[in-house]
Each structure stands twice: as C-alpha cells, then as structure tokens.
Image (spheres, rainbow, N blue to C red):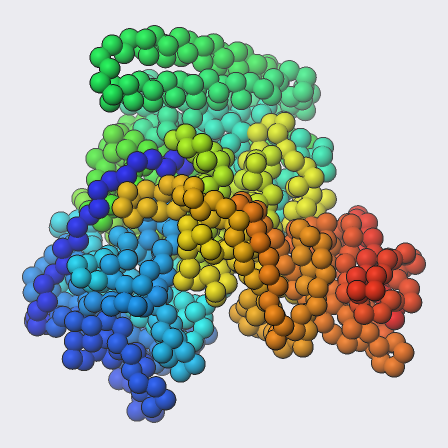
Amino acid sequence: MAPPNKSKPTPKVAATAAAAAPKLTTTGSTAVASKAATPSSSAPPCLFSLRDGALTVGGGTGKAAAVALLTGVPGNVTLTPFAEAFDPTTKASSDAPEELASQAAANASRGAFLGFTLPSPASRAPCRVGRLPAPRRFLSVFRFKTWWSTAWAGRRGRDLQMETQWVLLEVPELAGAGAGYVFVLPLVQGSFRSAVFPGEDDGVVVCAESGSAAVTGTDFRRIAYVHAGDDPYRVMQEAYLAARVHLGTFRTGTRAKPRCRLIQEKALPPMADRFGWCTWDAFYLTVDPAGVWQGVSEFADAGVPPRFLIIDDGWQSVNRDDDPQQEDARGLVLGGDQMTARLYRFDECARFRGYREGALIRRPPEVFYDKSMSKAVVRKAAEIENAGKAKKKAAQGGATDLSSFDAKVAQMRRELDQLLVQRDAMLAKLGDNDGDGEVGLKAFLKDMRRRFPGLDDVYVWQALCGGWGGVRPGATHLDARVVPARPSPGLAGTMEDLAVDRIIEGGIGLVRPDQAGDLYESMHSYIAGAGVTGVKVDVVHTLEYVCEEHGGRVELAKAYYDGLSKSIAKNFAGTGIIASMQQCNDFFFLGTRQVAMGRAGDDFWFEDPNGDPMGVFWLQGAHMVNCAYNSLWMGQFIRPDWDMFQSDHACAAFHAASRAICGGPVYVSDSLGSHDFALLRRLVFPDGTVPRCLHYALPTRDCLFKNPLFDQQTVLKIWNLNKFGGVIGAFNCQGAGWDPVEHRVRGYSHCYKPVSGDVRPADVEWGQREDTSAMAKAASYAVYRCQTEELLLMTPDSEPIQFTLQPSSFELFTFAPVTTIGGGAAKARFALIGLVDLLNCGGAIVDVQHGSGGEVMMKVKGEGRLLVYSDVAPKKSLVDGCEAGFEWENGGKLMVDVTWNQEKDGVSDVVLCF
C-alpha cells in the first residue's frame, strides 16, 4: 500500500553486443533448450521468420508481403517456431489439460520463441534483439514500481519503458491477413525471468536475469515469445495459452503440479459474486473487533449487507527488532509505520486476542464504542507524519534550528498515546467476561456470524513473507534470518516508493525456502480453524529483493509459491486468496496455480499522499486506467480485482460505475458512519450479491493504442458482456499519468477538461465468449444511456452515438439486441435492457424466453424499474403471476416495476403479453 513518491534517475541498459551465435554452454541451473519436435510436412509454415538481420511476420500465404518488425537483428538472436518446440502428440509431456494443449497446437504456426545466446555465462543478460523503427504503434505494460504496472503507448523503440512486461504491436499492413497484431511476451526460462527494455537508437532489449550471481547461463533461446493474429484480444489469449502449455512442459521426465494455470482452469472464489467491506481506509493499522462489528452493522442495517469481509493489515502479531520479542509493537497507525515490523507469532494481535465469546452479543458497539475514535487516531497520526515532512522540507531548505518541529512532534505523539490509551480502555470491555467459551479471533468470528448470518467469507491480510518485514528471527519455530533487501538493477528507473525504502531500511526476516510450506501451514491452519475463509496476500514481489543466496528469484519464488499453493488448497478450499502487489510476470508464470483473483491496479487513494491539491481527482482516473489495461494480461490468469473504493468519496460514482461492469468483486473501504447507501444500492442486491458481468472489462479496440490519461482527447472506454446484452463504460480519466522524464506518476492539470467520444455496437466484443457471440449478428440494438436515461435504437451501420464527458465523469451504455416476436397483430420488436436503478442494469436479467403466443417470459433479479424496448405496447404485463401496471411511450420505452421476491432469492417472474 505504498504511496506515490519521488522520482529516480533513468537506468541505462547496456545490451550484449551483436555477435555470431556462439557454441552453447550453460552454468548454474539454467536449462538448455531441448531437442525440437519435427513439424508435420502438412502443417502451415510459421508466420515469423528471421533472416538477413530482420524479424518479419506474414508473407507466407502470398496474400501480402512480409512486414519487418525488427531490423538490425544481431547474429546471436534466435527464432524457434512454436511447432518445432512443442509436440502435442506426447500428451504426458505437459501438465496442461489436453484441450489447452490441442488449442495451442492448432495455433502453432502463429507463434515462435524469440531468444538469444551468449558467448560467456551471465546472471543478468540484456540483449538487443533489433530495432523497432517508427511509425509502429504499440501498447505495452511496464512496472512503474516494484509491485505495480501501468500501460504505455508509443510508436518506436525509444518509447519503450523499463521493465516492460509485454508489447502489443499494430501491423495494419497485414490486417485481415492473419497478422494485424503481434504480441511480444517475455517469459521465464529455467532459473531466469525476462523483461523488455529500451535500447539506443530505437533498440529493443530483452533482459534475462536470475537475481543471483551464482546462477548464470548462456542459452536463452526461449526467453520470449511472439504471436500474431487479427484479433488483439485473441492474440493475447493465444499467446498466454502457448506460454502456459510451454511452461508446463516436462524436460526431465518428472511430473509435478503446474505452477501457473489459466483462469479457465480454475474456479472463482464465491466472494466474486458478493458485496464486501475492507477495513483498511476505516482503521488503517488500528483495526479492532468492535470497529469491525460496527462497520458491518452499519451496512446491514441500511439494507446493503456485506457478504464478505476483509480484515486488512493491522490484525497480526507484529513487532520491530527493538521491541520486546513477545509483545505487539505500539503506536502503529498509518501505512508505512509497520513496514519494518516482523511477524512474531502466527495468531492475532492483542486487540483481537483478548476478545471473549459473546462480548459484542451482550454489549453491542453502540453501547460503549466511540466510532469517531478511529478517525481521531488516524487524524493525529497524519498530523505527526505531516510535521515530519515539514521538518524534512525545512532542513532541505537550509534551516538549522529544527527544535520547534521536534517539540511539536513530541507533543503530538503524547496526544496520540493518550488517544490509544483511551481506545485500549474501551476495548478492554470485550474481555471482561470470565466465563466459558472461545476466545480471540475464533470467538469474534463466531459471534459475527451469529449476528450477521449472511456473512459468508472473512479474509485476512498477510504479506507473502508473513509480515511486511517477514518473520522475526528466534520468535517462532521457523528458521528465519534478516536478509538485506537489494532491488534488481532493472528497477532503478521505477518510481520512488515508501514501501521499498522501508523494506531496504529493515531487510526481510526470510524463512528458509524449504520451510516456506511450514510458514503458510502454521499461519493458515490456525486462522482457518478460527473461521477465516481466505487471505489477501500482499507485498508479493519482496522475494526478488532477497534471492541472491537462494538460487535466484525464480527458484526462491517457486519454493514460496509452491508452499502457498498447497496451503490454499488445504485450508481455504483451493480458491480463498486475493493476490496484491503482484504485478510482475514471474508471479503469473510461477505463482497462479491456486490464485484465481488478484488486484489489477495500484491502491485506491482517496487523496494524493504527497499533497497535490488536484490529487483527489487525478489519482482516480489513473487507478481506473491501470485496472483496465492490466486486465488485458492479468485476466488470462486471474479475475481482475479493481480494488475497493469509498462510497462517500468525491469520485465515488465514477468508481462505482467502473466496479459495476468490471466483472470482478465489488467492495468498499468506507470509514465508520461515512457511506452513500443510495449509490451502493445501485451496485448491490438486497441480499448482498451483485449483478456481475460474464467477462472481465477490457479497453475497446479504438482505445488500445491511445493514451486516455493525458493526450487531451481520448475517453477510456471499456467493454463487458452480460447474459443477454453488452455494456460499454465511458470514463474521462484525463489529467494524470506516468512522466517518462521525471519517472513518476504526476498530474497533468492542463488535460483535466471535458473530452468527447463516440460509441457503437461493434465496441462490444460479442465474439469473445461463445455464449454471447450470436448477439453480434443482430440487425439492430436498443441502447440505454445510464446518466441521461435515454433509450436509443442503432444498427451496426448507424452513425455512432456522440457524447462529451466532464472531468472525472462517466456514462454507461447498455446494448441489447432487438428481436422480433410473435406474428401478425401480435408482432413486436423487443429488447430487454434490465433494471435501470442498477448501474449494470443488464446484469439483473436471469433468463428470457419467447412464447409461441407472442409473450415474453423473463426472470429478473432485484427491485426497481425494469426497462424494455418495445415498438408496440403490450396487452398486459404480469409480475409473479399477478397483473401489473406498466408505462409505455411512443419511442418504445416500456417500464414495469418489480419488487424483491424474498421467497425466490430476489428473482421475479415477469411476463409481457403482446
């Protein structure tokens, strides 16, 4: 949960010199490329070729000439067609399901491995693979922090950023010829992972690194993969499918469980379809049982019951190296305070440990709990933090007498200590009962479920290494030692980060890799027994900082991810995990066996922690764009989680609209007493479930190579699918983004202004799912505009709908195909929009059937106004078997009111008779 901070100098990537391919050798644990399978003579030729110093695509069919993607390719760069590297006839050679292996084989001619060899072993090998000349539009995603990635578009090699995770090239010369887009995907090979970097003179550099000087190699012929096709979404899907099949290939004859699995291989956790609350922004590190109870109660009493709860950072038993070994660290309030603290026991902290069963049943929080206390504590801690910043600024300005700052901070610390004493006295009432019964977290969650029986899931926060600072040496039965944290050279140009600074300051209490499974089992078996159903695993990429003596980053990650996967499978039904701070390719290739949900963007920040007066607004658009574009690749492995937000925030509706159609979980981090329940009711059904879209939201095609953050002209448009229609979300996110010179995310205030755009039926990618593809063939569509409440008709050939959005504002367009029902006098043109009191109105439609007598029978979940397009008025309408009134206008707008049908889980049967 690291805030945006200052910039760092740009790293200079020195690529290996061009050379003839040397004789291959390997050292360390790098695997040599295996003998290639012999392709069938009837197989189509590979779309890619490497000859005369150029990497080309296309040209094999005679329909279009080959196009050079990279020029000046050095002699040590290699290209291996996928068909030669994978033999689908040997089913036992890969852990991928047979269906996936067959799909990869069917697309084999579209892909190839791009790699290189070295004349001498290296642990970090940046290799120039050619020059990407202009103009060639591309979209990429790169790591702007250790943990977080963002999108970047450009037109030539020099536009690339450091630590690029993938590149999508537009090849309009071959559009319609099977290669209109080319995807470049850095991979993991043996003990090395890779990323793309910019080189001199528009050069493209692929850098392979092990993370340990002891692990070196010379053969990197499968360190990256290229794939071509005419559909950008399918190109990425097929590329990751090929990578998954390839990375699951056994070259040693030893079969093991897969380290990565694609999203279609896994079940989503049940909380994906339910509304939730996260404690972070309400309490930060001061979370306590009474406050959690109070928060859930406020939602439930307002008719918006949380079905899942995330008890975020602050519940664990952590302390710092100079604290008594078996006592909680005192005074931890804001994010950052805890980043040098380490886990010293596997159960809950004293605030939760002292809870006794029945305490809040007998005496609910409203009787004794001051819900303003958490805000007062956080406010005082923020004052101390700001005073520290002011002192630092004064010192940088040349001030020599800083005693006034020290005195002020000392006084405020005394005031904070007094507040914490008052809080502890208040919480002591939770342990007053000396009777029988459970104690601690188990008792608390048992009581929570008695009071809130609809609370299905409770997740708790943890860092991948236990706590932010790992595990305290000597405090547990595990062998942990503090390892100095050293970021890899490739991160030198990323944005300065408080979390990184603190981790470097304190190092990581790293549990020995062969005990990683024991670490997770010790943590998870205890909390699972207490009633916890899942974990939010944060600070994932810490491992790459401490891998030098453990075989490098890939091998250390394998040990930890394997232990984590086994524990999730055993303790949390195989799905109870959300990954966070995980946005780097080695996590997805090595750690997604059980993970089916993970964060798609950086943290939701309700304001800029650095005090930018415009930050309350521009940070929101940046968050949304990060989520949308990261979903392009993360969605191949996990269901993207767009993170929580606060329902009373200035941009709450802006966020709510994106969460409504993102296809992932919907949850908020409201402070106590600070809610907009009217807005939440547009997101959540009365039973705490949500109308989730079928797919995960992605940028529309016309946004792929644009900059919706600060080009002053592009509206972010995202598409998704419902069972009987599609939806386009349009968001004005202009006003922020990455600065490639300053190497930080900053505001672009001159871009914070109205932007215009357009929308059409083809913006919805109907064909991305088999069960929605038929809707692409509709002759016309009814389109509903959420904000203006207009209902329009369009054909595929209609002029697009034009719109203008103010800064930090949105519009949702619901598309429903028009069908003709009945005949003769009963003939009608009909399209079902949905419950328009919901932001994702089409998600309320459960089923639609057409009767032979000109009637339409619908199952609708929820309550409110059901909107239908009909060119004629129905003869009558029925709701749950009873005749119901309706309103019909000449434009075809037909409205029927439905109520929540408790007996049928909120589903009403609606019949329209024509």
Q: Quadrant of the N terminus?
A: top left
Q: Is residue 574 visible?
A: no
Residue 581 versus residue 379 in the image, above or below: below
Camera-side residue of 310 and 526 = 310
Q: Position of residue 877 (x, y in %)?
A: 88, 62
Where is residue 773 drawn, in percent x and y?
A: 59, 73
Q: Residue 111: which quarter of the image?
A: bottom left
Q: Position of residue 281 (x, y in %)?
A: 51, 32
> Which residue appears at 74% of the width and 67% of the height?
831
Q: Quadrant of the C terminus?
A: bottom right
Of residues 320 and 416, which is closer to you in this image? 416
- Residue 886 relative to residue 666: left or right: right
Residue 48 vertical position relative to residue 648 in the rendered view, above or below: below
Provide residue 379's location: percent of width, then percent of height: 48, 20
Q: In the rendered view, does 647 fall on the left or right side of 877?
A: left
Give above or below for 705 relative to 345.
Answer: below
Say whether residue 679 is visible.
Answer: yes
Quick check: 688 left or right of 767?
Answer: right
Horizontal side of residue 273 vs 852, given as left or right: left
State the residue at coordinates (21%, 35%): 484
Q: Nearer the viewer, residue 467 or 325?
A: 467
Name the residue rendered at 32%, 68% in the picture. 136
Up-down: is 77 above or below 651? Answer: below
> Quarter-wise, where is residue 827 in the image?
bottom right
- 172 or 34, nearer to the observer: 172
Residue at image coords 34%, 39%? 465
